[in-house]
Amino acid sequence: MKVYHGGSVEIIDIDLSRCELYHDFGKGFYVTNIREQAEFWAERKGGDNHPGGHVTEFDFVEAAFEHWNFKALRFEDYSREWLDFVVMNRDRSRPVPAHDYDIVEGPVADDKIAQRARLCVKGIVSRETFLEELKFAKHTHQICFCTHQSLQALEAVRAPARIIIDIDEAVAGSLVNNFGMSEEEAVDHYYASRTYGKLIDESTGLYLRPWREIYDMLLAELKLK
């Protein structure tokens, strides 16, 4: 399964000690199989130094839920059991960790839902009313990796192999469209350039830049700008 983490920067190494407390499923590393959801969180967590944030893609071995020696908990949808579990983990008066699961999967308590959950805990909104409201909530998804052992089921899909292909197509296509080159000419110019050499050198980090920036570099190198 492809899963995604939205944050301020790309995740190279997962450090559970840096994860925040009192989230839906407790302290842990969170991913989702909904890319748009990860993009939302990347945008939200990005700041002046990292505008737009970054979405890191992972491969998750789903067999870990059933066939690996992990203690896993899965909620298929919003339910009373899900609500009780989220309330328990968000309760700042409780010691942490509040549970001993390795992996937890289920829907998200976003800002609006979390606010209603707090009212529910205080008795202002009944559990029955809250659960009825959740029937109309937008579909969300998250998996929390709570222990170091559970991270064995998660492997980052490194950007160069995936992203560079997209950049190649965009840059070569722009040479064809903007300068009337044949596809063969565009590819030859591109692959023979110093710009491409820098792009495939992972240490430069150039592959993390927008493709138009790389295209402009190439045009300057080819004196087409």
Image (tube, grey):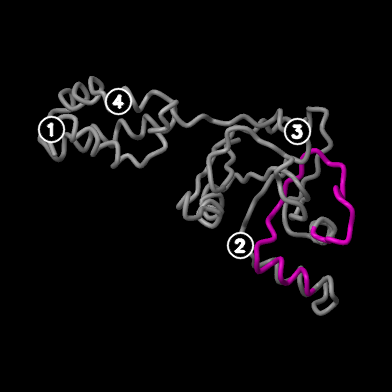
Quote the CA–CA distance across marks 3 and 2.
28 Å
Q: Nearer the viewer, mark 1 or mark 3?
A: 1
Q: Which residue type does callout 2 highlight?
A: Lys
Nearest to viewer (mark 2 / mark 4) = 4
Identify the residue at image location x=78%, y=50%.
26
Residue at horizontal 31%, vertical 22%?
A: 197
Mark 2 secondary-structure assignment: loop
Question: Is 40 placed left or right of 22 in the picture?
Answer: left
Where residue 157 appears, as percent x and y from the top left, is 54, 30
Q: Which residue is mark 1?
A: 223
**Looking at the rendering, which quadrant does residue 3 occupy?**
top right
Which residue is labeled 4 in the image?
A: 196
Question: Where residue 138 is drawn, which disc sits there?
Answer: 2
Point out the frontmost of discs 4 and 1.
Answer: 1
| Residue 90 rendering spot, x and y as whole percentages | 79, 59
Q: Which residues are magenta?
A: 90-119
Whichever of callouts 1 and 2 sits on the residue coming sooner in the sequence is 2
- 68 or 110, which lies in front? 110
Among numbered discs 3 and 4, the one appearing first in the sequence: 3
Which amino acid type is marked by label 1?
Lys
What is the spatial separation of the Cα atoms under label 4 and label 1, in whole angstroms? 15 Å
Q: Residues within 10 Å of mark 4 (few under 14, many from 20)?
A: many
Labels 3 & 4 near each other (Cβ < 8 A): no
Helix, strand or loop for disc 3: helix
**Is 108 situated above or below 198?**
below
Mark 1–mark 2 distance (CA, rounded to whole Å): 50 Å
